[in-house]
Image (cartoon, rainbow, N blue to C red):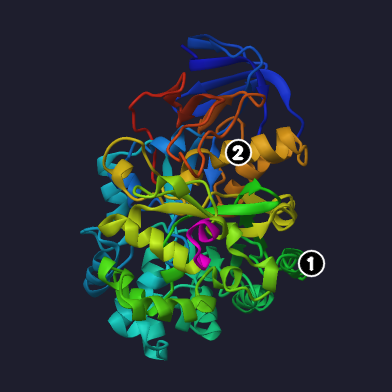
């Protein structure tokens, strides 16, 4: 036969942003063999009767380095049309390490990986198999702890240590890493000077790689942080990807400033672009899932150097008062600490699930505080203490930005769509993991993007929206054989209904698959058929 399968009568969205067209798509040996008017014999013919056919979605910002080893079926990702991911973001990747760095990060993460190098990690993934394609960046945090050990949490690296980090980074790049990622809001990366980042990015630039940065601050000092990212790019020559590029409260409105900074840098010759999460929009706010304790303790001294926050700490009055006084310094502290008076209120912190206080599920903490006759902060602790040892399993959502800010970056021509999530599954070991920041996004945020911004708000044409999820992230990664419906491209293809596609995951019930994705092919192999996973694992490791 000429072809393995032939998709007929498709509404083809080719990933370039060009107008859709009707035609056929032929696939042979995992690659697209013909597009448009196709002649030849095929083993299988799939008549899609006008459904949309596009490249599979590419999530350029993923944190599934380890979860895809636990759940290689990639359940929550593949069911929403994701066929490729770029892992290793925010300065934390699955590799590389020396033995010291591996032991430290295994202890902090609670995951026993026995590999050290990027090549060894890819070998593990390939031996186990995976349903979608995986690429990775090299995390700054990995380099720091491998070279400096626990000292990385207390000081900046010396020049000799930077040179050692560059050697580890170069080896990782040679073995297929797409570049360097940083998460400058997170320990131990907060102490890394700009000059060190420029030095490391010189190495990345020499390989043509990408510097993907979670900038040093995303609220009050977001403009200064964006300028630092641009300076690193211009002084090192590295390509820059600003991740989840937008301003959090209380700096709403500053997204325009940092997007304009990127446009100005591009006009000067810097290869810079960015991605944004299509935040769940309610009441004009962009909401982000979270554990209930997370916004209070992430970045606090109690979690330094891999520390764990225990129930004994939760019930300690001195710990509680310390966290109350130190709230402004937490990741979402400026939202909750009231730095803008009534504009920053606890009605932006919603409780989605508590096991022992279900009467409060679905209410915000200001409402709960009124019912309990307590300050919202005290009401939060009351809820958590009532959960007992299971307090880490209580979750909710917090409004971190405005719809205006989300729209301003998300709709920009150089913005890719990303979901910044860890793969999940409603069955198996992942289903028992606490619901956290990314769980809801892991199930339906790409469908939500089309549902909200294309179908309901009509802020994007369908073709432009598809480009943001396919051709554009492929181009940013340097994937020249994926992300488009073109002959010779790998056949990462989804068949879907733009009128039906819909997210069904909510903060109250997060582990629910979306509607509208009829078939998913990865490298020409059918992975999702009629809303069911076929169980095959045809994914590949993507090496830069």
Residue at 47 percent across and 77 percent down: it is: 324
Q: Position of residue 77 (x, y in %)?
A: 45, 39
Q: Is residue 398 visible?
A: no
Residue bearing the label numbered 2? 448
Q: Are marks 2 and 1 in contact (CB under 8 Å)?
A: no
**Secondary-structure class at tag 1:** helix
Q: Residues within 10 Å of mark 2 (few under 14, many from 20)?
A: many
Q: Residues within 10 Å of mark 1 (few under 14, many from 20)?
A: few
Q: Nearer the viewer, residue 453 or 147?
A: 453
**Image mark for residue 51:** none
Using residue 288 as the reference point, say whether residue 227 is left or right of it: right
Q: Nearer the viewer, mark 2 or mark 1?
A: 2
The magenta stretch is: 368-376
Q: In the rendered structure, does residue 499 fall within the stretch colored magenta? A: no
Q: Is residue 358 visible?
A: yes
Q: Earlier in the sequence, mark 2 or mark 1?
A: 1
Q: Position of residue 510 (x, y in %)?
A: 46, 41
Q: Note whether 119 is above or below 527 in the view shown.
A: below
Q: Position of residue 267 (x, y in %)?
A: 79, 67
Using residue 453 as the reference point, say whether residue 439 is left or right of it: left
**Secondary-structure class at tag 2:** helix
State which quadrant residue 525 falls in. Answer: top left
Q: Note whether 42 is above or below 189 in the view shown.
A: above
Marks 2 and 1, how far apart at CA: 33 Å
Residue at 53 percent across and 58 percent down: it is: 365
Q: Position of residue 271 (x, y in %)?
A: 67, 64
Residue bearing the label numbered 1? 267
Q: Nearer the viewer, residue 457 or 239?
A: 457
Q: In the rendered structure, does residue 371 fall within the stretch colored magenta? A: yes
State which quadrant residue 164 falls in. Answer: bottom left
Q: Note whether 248 is above or below 495 in the view shown.
A: below
């Amino acid at each position: 036969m000429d072809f393995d399968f032939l998709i007929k009568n498709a509404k083809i969205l080719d990933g370039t942003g060009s107008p859709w067209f009707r035609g056929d798509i032929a696939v042979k040996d995992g690659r697209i063999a013909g597009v448009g008017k196709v002649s030849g014999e095929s083993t299988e013919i799939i008549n899609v009767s006008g459904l949309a056919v596009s490249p599979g979605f590419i999530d350029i910002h993923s944190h599934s380095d380890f979860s895809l080893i636990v759940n290689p079926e990639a359940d929550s990702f593949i069911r929403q049309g994701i066929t490729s991911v770029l892992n290793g973001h925010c300065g934390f990747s699955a590799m590389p390490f020396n033995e010291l760095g591996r032991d430290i990060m295994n202890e902090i993460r609670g995951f026993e990986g026995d590999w050290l190098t990027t090549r060894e990690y890819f070998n593990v993934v390939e031996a186990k198999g995976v349903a979608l394609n995986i690429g990775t960046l090299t995390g700054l945090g990995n380099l720091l702890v491998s070279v400096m050990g626990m000292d990385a949490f207390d000081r900046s690296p010396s020049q000799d240590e930077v040179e050692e980090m560059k050697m580890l980074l170069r080896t990782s790049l040679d073995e297929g890493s797409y570049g360097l990622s940083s998460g400058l809001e997170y320990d131990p990366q907060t102490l890394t000077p700009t000059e060190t980042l420029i030095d490391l990015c010189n190495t990345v630039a020499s390989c043509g790689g990408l510097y993907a940065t979670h900038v040093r601050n995303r609220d009050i000092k977001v403009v200064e942080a964006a300028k630092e990212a641009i300076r690193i790019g211009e002084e090192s020559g590295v390509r820059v990807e600003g991740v989840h590029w937008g301003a959090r409260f209380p700096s709403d409105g500053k997204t325009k400033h940092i997007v304009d900074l990127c446009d100005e840098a591009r006009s000067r010759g810097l290869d810079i672009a960015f991605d944004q999460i299509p935040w769940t929009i309610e009441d004009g706010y962009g909401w982000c899932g979270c554990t209930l304790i997370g916004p209070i303790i992430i970045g606090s001294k109690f979690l330094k150097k891999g520390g764990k926050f225990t129930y004994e700490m939760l019930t300690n009055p001195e710990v509680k008062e310390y966290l109350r006084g130190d709230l402004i310094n937490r990741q979402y502290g400026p939202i909750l600490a009231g730095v803008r008076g009534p504009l920053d209120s606890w009605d932006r912190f919603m409780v989605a699930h508590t096991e022992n206080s279900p009467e409060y599920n679905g209410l915000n903490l200001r409402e709960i505080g009124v019912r309990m006759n307590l300050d919202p902060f005290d009401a939060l602790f009351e809820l958590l203490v009532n959960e007992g040892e299971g307090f880490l399993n209580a979750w909710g959502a917090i409004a971190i930005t405005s719809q205006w800010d989300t729209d301003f970056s998300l709709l920009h021509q150089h913005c890719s769509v990303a979901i910044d999530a860890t793969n999940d599954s409603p069955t198996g070991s992942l289903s028992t993991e606490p619901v956290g920041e990314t769980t809801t996004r892991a199930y339906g945020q790409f469908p939500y993007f089309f549902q909200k911004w294309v179908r309901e708000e009509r802020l994007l044409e369908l073709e432009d929206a598809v480009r943001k999820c396919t051709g554009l992230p492929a181009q940013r990664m340097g994937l020249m054989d994926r992300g488009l419906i073109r002959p010779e491209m790998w056949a990462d293809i989804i068949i879907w209904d733009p009128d039906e596609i819909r997210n069904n995951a909510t903060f109250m019930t997060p582990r629910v698959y979306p509607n509208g994705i009829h078939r998913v092919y990865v490298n020409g192999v059918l992975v999702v058929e009629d809303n069911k996973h076929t169980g095959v694992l045809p994914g590949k490791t993507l090496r830069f």
